[in-house]
Amino acid sequence: MKSYCVTLNREKILPHMEKILAEKCYCEFVHKKRYPCEDGFIEVMLFEKLHLRTTSYSGLTVVFVCREEVCYADVFAFAGGDGILNIDWGAGNSLAKEVVTVLEEFV
C-alpha cells in the first residue's frame, strides 16, 4: 500500500472532483460519502482500476478533510496481482502518483 498527502486550496476544490479524478486517471469511480463536521466536512471517495497489461487491479481511497480555507487530501492506493506469483508490478503506486499529479493542479 502507498499513501500520499496533498494540501489543497478549498476554494479550488470542485463539487464533482470524483469525475475529474476518474477521467484524468482512467479509473472507475465506485463510491463517495460526505460527513459534515463543525467547521467543514470529510469526504471519502473510492476508485478502482484494471491494468490489462499485467492483469492486476488497483484500488484507491481519497479522503478529503476540508476545514475553513484549507483542504487536505490523503491518497491511499493498493493493488492485487493475478497469476501464480500474485505480483501487482507497482500498479497501486502508479495510480496514487497519477491522482497526486491531478490534485496538485488544485493547490
Image: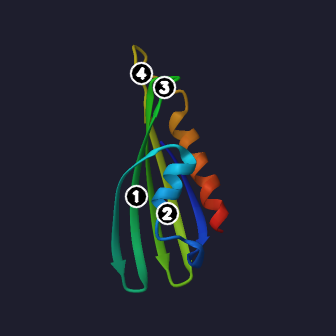
> Amino acid type of disc 2?
Met
Location of mark 2 (residue): 17
Q: In the picture shown, does residue 72 fall above or below 19?
A: below
- Check disc 1 and give the amino acid type: Met
Pinpoint residue 91: horizontal percent, then vertical percent: 52, 34
N-terminal label among 2 and 1:
2
Q: Residue at x 47, y 57 (%)?
A: 19
For the point 56% across and 82% down, the residue is 69
Nearest-to-viewer mark from 3 and 1 = 3
Q: Name the residue under label 3.
A: 52
Whichever of callouts 4 and 2 sits on the residue coming sooner in the sequence is: 2
Cβ–Cβ under 8 Å for marks 2 and 1: yes
Mark in front: 2 vs 1: 2
Residue type marked 3:
Leu
Determine the CA span between mark 2 and mark 3: 25 Å
* Crowdedness near tag 1: few (<14), some (14–19) or many (≥20) residues, C-alpha within 10 Å: some
Q: Earlier in the sequence, mark 2 or mark 3?
A: 2
Q: Mark 1 points at which residue?
A: 45
Q: Are marks 4 and 3 in contact (CB under 8 Å)?
A: no
Of the two numbered discs 4 and 3 in the rendering, the one whose residue sits closer to the viewer: 3
Amino acid at pointer 4: Asn
Whole-percent x, y for residue 67 in the image? 49, 80
Residue beneath disc 4:
86
Q: Could you tell me which secondary element the residue under label 2 belongs to?
A: helix
